[in-house]
Amino acid sequence: MPPDARLRDGATIRGNGTVGRTDRADVPFEQRGSGGGVTLTVIGVDGGPLPPGADAALAGAEVVVGAARNLQRLPVPGAAEQLVLGPVEPALEKLAGRRAVVLASGDPGFFGIVRLLRERGHEPVVLPARSSVQLLFARLGRSWDDVAVVSAHGRDLGPAVNVCRARAATAVLTGPGAGPSEIGAALDGWARTLVVAEDLGGPDERVTSVPAAEAAVRSWHALSVVLCLRPEDPAAAGRGWYAGGEPAPPPDGWALPDEAFEHRAGMVTKAEVRAVALPRLAPRPGTLVWDVGAGSGSVAVECARLGAAVLAVERREDDVARVRANATAHGVEVRVVAGAAPAALAALPRPDAVFVGGGGPEVVAAAAAAGPRRIVVALAALDRVAPTRAALTAAGYALGGVQVAASRLAELPDGSVRLAATNPITLVWGEVQER
């Protein structure tokens, strides 16, 4: 259904729940569900008073659907059938053709049931309460327009954790198997504090701030929302303009000039090579990228600037310092693992993509064994192309590759220009094939 399906012929929705028209008097605004003219109302519950209109909707309901805790808290009319919301589909089938109310926690339109109802053809009246995220930040007395908000409820925890790894401040909506303990354990190696808000608005409400490692070994209320912070809370870092922080891609682009990175005697992945490698790596919020043999960390920094969580593996102590300095200079976080691959790759969290800038086929094989969807290998020596391809083929990847040989404009003493060739680099990549 199109987003403007409720507004036809110049109608506007007024704050009192009526439809206003310029050509005739106000008429009642009725939302139609799949039952053909029967109102479906979704009421948000946050532990406080119900939103305006909720009592009337409950009084006229034939069926009320909600989690057991919400049904127990509210005075549901005796004539209405009450259904505890477990599996969603059977409950939705009971709504067809009846005046129905769905009780949902917080704001049902914020990672809530409204999306699912609309997908099933319903056009619900939504009476929202305060979301758990709103309540958390109200309890903390902290603004939250700089905070990324992600959901791990009923979803894979990995993308949510990767945003926590990449961002300075992230709020996580939790769920079974994706609670504060699991989030804390997944953040091993990243310096993070978790603010855990349990049972907000309920009798067991509690807000606790602990290091991620401590959160991993504690038990928590089943209803919780988590704020993941770097040790220095960035709340006072200036006025924002974009909810969730600066958008990706960064406003000044990518494939930055080589001079944007501190490097050792020209040992930096050239801008032209990065321009080809980055789309193959596909860094974005919710993903984790390894940069193996990171050198200056230019690829790691570029991936972090595009929103990914990033691990850089580097064996040289001076280059380890350079990676950290370059990340700081560009305002991003890169976790640096000091050590030589492939041994240093053991026990690292599973990546979505890997860039191999140094090491032989054994490093490529070890990176592939970690199970990333994408691997990109940069090779200066042609005799390493065949064994690299063999290692990726053995791991089941579909292969591609290109040689990047760029010539840059360089000024001559008389003011004219010439072409100055850079060293050609062969990029070999592998991607997991769709099945």
Image (cartoon, grey):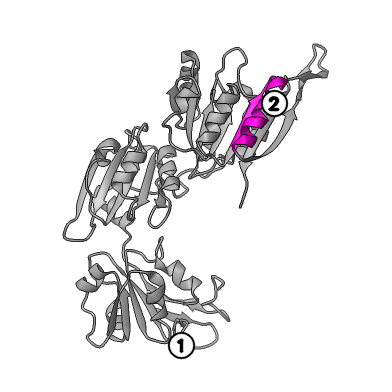
x and y percentages locating residue 415 in the rendered image: 81, 16
Residue at point 48%, 13% (across, down):
318
Q: Please, is residue 39 above or below residue 263 in the view?
A: below
From the image, tell me which residue sits under label 2.
Answer: 385
175 or 41, which lies in front?
A: 175
Q: Secondary structure at mark 2?
A: helix
Type of amino acid under label 1: Gly
x and y percentages locating residue 256 in the rendered image: 62, 29
Residue at point 46%, 87% (across, down):
37
Please say whether residue 85 is one of the residues in the magenta stretch.
no
Q: Hey, which quadrant is residue 127 in on the image?
A: bottom left
130 or 392, which lies in front?
A: 392
Q: Is residue 279 left or right of residue 179?
A: right
Q: Is residue 301 visible?
A: no
Q: Which residues are magenta?
A: 375-395
Q: Please, is residue 256 above or below residue 114 in the view?
A: above
x and y percentages locating residue 383 in the rendered image: 71, 20
Q: Please, is residue 262 above or below residue 227 in the view?
A: above
Q: Is residue 289 visible?
A: yes
Q: Is residue 124 left or right of residue 430?
A: left
Which numbered dot is residue 110?
A: none
Q: Secondary structure at mark 1?
A: loop
Are dots 2 and 1 in contact, CB under 8 Å? no
Residue at point 56%, 79% (across, down):
10
Alpha-carbon neighbours of circle 1 within 10 Å: few (<14), some, or many (≥20)? few
From the image, tell me which residue sits under label 1.
Answer: 37
Please say whether residue 390 is one of the residues in the magenta stretch.
yes
Magenta span main SS: helix
